[in-house]
Image (cartoon, rainbow, N blue to C red):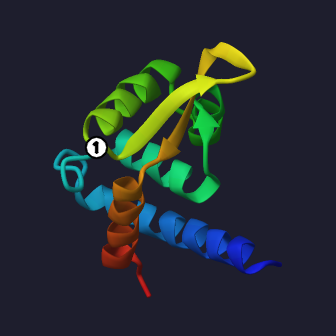
């Protein structure tokens, strides 16, 4: 396993562990983000650039929920989006540097270690 694979696996483990902490803020969110936004951003940080259909399947969330969440995250500068070069109808999403930092802080604050 390469160092980047190990780092990705560790981040994924820590995000899953931190997910339990979401129950502590069902309405309040985390730094202005709701649960769907936090899940979407975490998935992009862990897995890199993805499409809404891929995210919907991975997170078991409705595409319309993810579209709304991605619009809000983009508005805040936490993710970036661009058209898929192979299919201009499809949008690809990726975490921006600010989004990565936010997830790293979230994991550090909520990791049960």
Left-right relation of 58 to 3: left
Q: Indicate the quadrant containing the N terminus: top left, top right, bottom left or bottom right.
A: bottom right
- Left or right: residue 96 compared with residue 73: right
Q: Position of residue 42 (x, y in %)?
A: 48, 54
Image quadrant in which you'd find residue 88: top right
Side (left or right) of 82 relative to 8: left
Q: How many marks?
A: 1
Q: Quadrant of the C terminus?
A: bottom left
Residue 111 lies, in percent from the top left, at 41, 78
At 59% from the left and 66% from the top, the residue drawn is: 12
From this viewpoint, which residue is outermost toward the right?
1
Q: Residue at x 43, y 24 (%)?
A: 67
Look at the picture and state if 72 lies above or below 83.
below
Question: 32 and 84: which one is in front?
Answer: 84
Residue at image coords 26%, 46%: 33
Q: Residues within 10 Å of mark 1 (few under 14, many from 20)?
A: some
Q: Quadrant of residue 105?
A: bottom left
Q: Nearer the viewer, residue 110 or 102?
A: 102
Instruction: Determine whether, in the image, residue 26 is placed left or right of residue 22.
Output: left
Residue 24 location (% of width, % of height) = 25, 61
Q: Is residue 54 above or below residue 106?
A: above
Q: Which residue is mark 1?
A: 34
Residue at horizontal 65 percent and vertical 24 percent from the top = 84
Q: Quick one: which residue is furthest to the top in this view?
A: 89
Q: Residue furthest bottom?
A: 113
Above or below residue 109? Residue 57 is above
The image quarter in which residue 74 lies: top left
> In this view of the protein, which residue sits in the foreground, 96 or 67?
96
Label 1 residue SS = loop
**Viewer-proximal residue among 2 and 83:** 83
- The x, y position of residue 40, in whole percent, is 47, 43
């Amino acid at each position: 396993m390469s160092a980047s694979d190990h780092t990705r696996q560790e981040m994924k483990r820590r995000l899953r562990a931190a997910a339990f902490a979401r129950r502590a803020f069902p309405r309040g969110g985390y730094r202005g983000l709701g649960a769907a936004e936090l899940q979407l951003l975490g998935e992009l940080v862990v897995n890199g650039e993805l499409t809404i259909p891929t995210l919907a399947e991975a997170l078991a969330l409705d595409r319309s929920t993810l579209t709304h969440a991605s619009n809000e995250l983009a508005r805040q500068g936490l993710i970036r989006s661009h058209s898929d070069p192979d299919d201009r109808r499809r949008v690809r999403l990726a975490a921006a540097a600010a989004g990565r930092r936010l997830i790293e802080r979230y994991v550090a604050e909520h990791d049960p270690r």
